[in-house]
Structure formats: C-alpha cells, structure tokens
Image: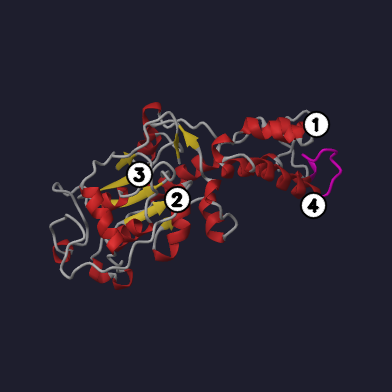
Amino acid sequence: MARVKKGAKARPKRGASTSKRGASTSKRAATTRTSKRGATFDIVYVGPTLAASEVVRLLPNSSVRGPVAIGDVLRAIDEPGVRRIAIIDGYFERMAAVWHKEILLAIEAGIEVWGAASMGALRAAELAPFGMRGVGAIYERFASGELEADDEVAVAHLPAEFGYRTTSVALVDLRDGIERTTTAPIDRDGVERTTTAPIDRCVTPDNERATDDLVTLREKLVELARVPFYRDRSWERLCADAKAAGIPARVVVALASPPPSRKTADAILLLTTMHDTAPTPRVTVASQPAMRVPRTWALGQLRAWLAKQSPLAGRPRGRIARI
C-alpha cells in the first residue's frame, strides 16, 4: 500500500485556519455532532469486499461510499451528523491512500473510526494505540505482527459502474483458504468429510505424515500463492502452480473449491459489531488533550487541494482499479 507522505515541518501562521469550516473550535464544543434535523449517521467506505446493499442491510443508518482515498476522511469530518466512520476498502495505487493523519483528526473530533478486512484492517492495526477500532481475523493478524506486508489485502477490481467486481484474489484470502482447506477432513478423492478424525492426518498425501509435514505443505502453498504480482493472484493460478510444483492431486482438488472470503467475513463482522455497539457521543477536542493532532504544512496543503477538487476527482475510471 502507498505510504503516507511526510510533509514539511513548516508551521502555519498563528490564527490561520487549516480548513474551510468557517467555525472556530469553540463553536464545535457540542458533545454530539448532528445535522440540522438532529440526525446522525455512519459512513462506510467499501468497494469489492462487500456489496453496498449488504452494508445497508447490516448497518441501516449508514451512508455507503466507495473505497476510501486521500482526503475522503478529512471531508467527512466536516459533514454534519457523522458519528462513526467504517473503513473496509481503500485505494492505494492509482491514487494516494487515505492518510493516517486524516483518521487521527477524525478521532480527535470525537468521531469513532473503525476498520476491518482490507485497508481498514491495515490502518486499524497501525492506529489502534490512538483509538481506531479494529475488528476481525485479518486485523488481529496485522495487529499481532503475524502479517506485515500491505499486499496481503490488495486485489484488482473493476470500477464502480461494474460493481467493483474483483479480478484477482487477495493473498490473505488465499492464505486463509489454504489453512482452512488443509485442516478440513478430506477423503482421498478430495471431498470434505464430516468426521472428526485428526485434522493433521486427513489432508496429507499419504495420510501417514506428521504434523510437521503438514505445516511444511501449508508454507509451500502460501509461498506459491505469494509469488505472483497481486493482480495476478487467483485460486486457478494457485492450483496450476501447486500442480506444477508436485503438490498431491487431492490437495489441489480441495483448493479448487475454496472456502468463502475471509475479507468478506471480516467486513460483515465489522458491520454487525457496529450495529450491536452503541456509538459514544462526540466530545470536544478540549476533552481529549492527548489527541491534539499537529496542523502541519502538509495538512494545510491537502486542505487547499481538496478545496479545489470535487469529491470524486481522480477516482480510477479505467477497466481495472486497484485496492
């Protein structure tokens, strides 16, 4: 994923505004930010991981946006009524990724920021010490340090007009599928059984190998999955590479029918968790002195750039966008 660019350390002039809100901090001292009608809502940034219709079903009081990109969260802070932001998907290659500082500013403003599955899991793992909330197995693996590479969650997909349909599979989904496939009881013909025989002896080539050999098998499959560039990764490619590498046939057969996406499962878990969790009231910046985010020169430049852009400016419009 793209890294946040570090801005110059030049300080803005005293009293100069870093936004076009036209309201001072004192005027934003209300405990809860509401719209003119007093309504509050959640924003969900999502693309290929979960359909917008599913988001609305799971979290009815939400505004579904596309994958998050640079400046989106900064804009969202200024929207009346925003109480929580959920980041699932986010751009990173054909346009700049959402800045960490944007998320910190939202937290400073009293907006809850949640993340899971993809870009959201990455940012949540990085910003958990500052109050961003992570959910799901993928987040947990990044937060623990088990996973580190940004390309674990990267996929290629079609643009919005095609429903963000994916054209590749994320490495984290391939990894998860490998782990689940090689722990399910598998018959010699590759058909999953429902017996409770020892899982570390059910998928191994000769049904005689020790657990260490099974771990080696998984590691080899994960390495085969990792080799292709992220937009070329797929279950079909993994099966072909596994067959060429001499992986036992019934293991390849099992991989050809992979389990459901872990990214999608984590996204659903995020939304159901948010649905079942009452949002905390928005509080004043003054009540969170430890979360005062520096207003750097780079942040001021970003605000100035956003003031000249439409919300959808720069969104990928080709046949393939990347996330």
Q: Based on the displayed image, in which of its 4 quarters is residue 14 positioned? A: bottom left
The furthest residue to the bottom:
289
Query: Reading the chain from its start, which is encountered first: label 1 or label 3?
Result: 3
Q: Residues at badges 2 and 1 in contact (C-beta under 8 Å)?
A: no
Query: Reading the chain from its start, which is encountered first: label 4 or label 3?
Result: 3
Amino acid residing under circle 2: Ala
Does dot 1 land on a helix, a strand or a loop? loop
Does dot 4 land on a helix, a strand or a loop? helix
Give the residues in magenta: 201-211
For disc 2, the marked residue is 2
Query: Reading the chain from its start, which is encountered first: label 4 or label 1?
Result: 1
For disc 3, the marked residue is 44
Q: Residue visible at 44% across and 54% down?
A: 3
Residue 275's spot in the image, x, y percent? 37, 47
Real-space CA distance between mark 3 and mark 2, rounded to the nearest whole angstrom: 21 Å
Viewer can see residue 246: yes
For disc 4, the marked residue is 212
Real-space CA distance between mark 1 and mark 3, rounded to the nearest whole angstrom: 44 Å
Amino acid residing under circle 1: Arg
Q: Quadrant of the C terminus?
A: top left
Is 204 part of what is drawn in magenta? yes
Residue 7's spot in the image, x, y percent? 34, 61
Real-space CA distance between mark 4 and mark 1, rounded to the nearest whole angstrom: 20 Å
Which mark identifies residue 103?
none
Q: Is 305 situated left or right of 67 in this image?
A: left
Query: Reading the chain from its start, which is encountered first: label 2 or label 4?
Result: 2
Local packing at callout 2 (Cα closer than 10 Å; few below 14, some 14-19, many 20+) is some
Q: Residue visible at 70% across and 31% down?
A: 240
Residue 5's spot in the image, x, y percent? 39, 57
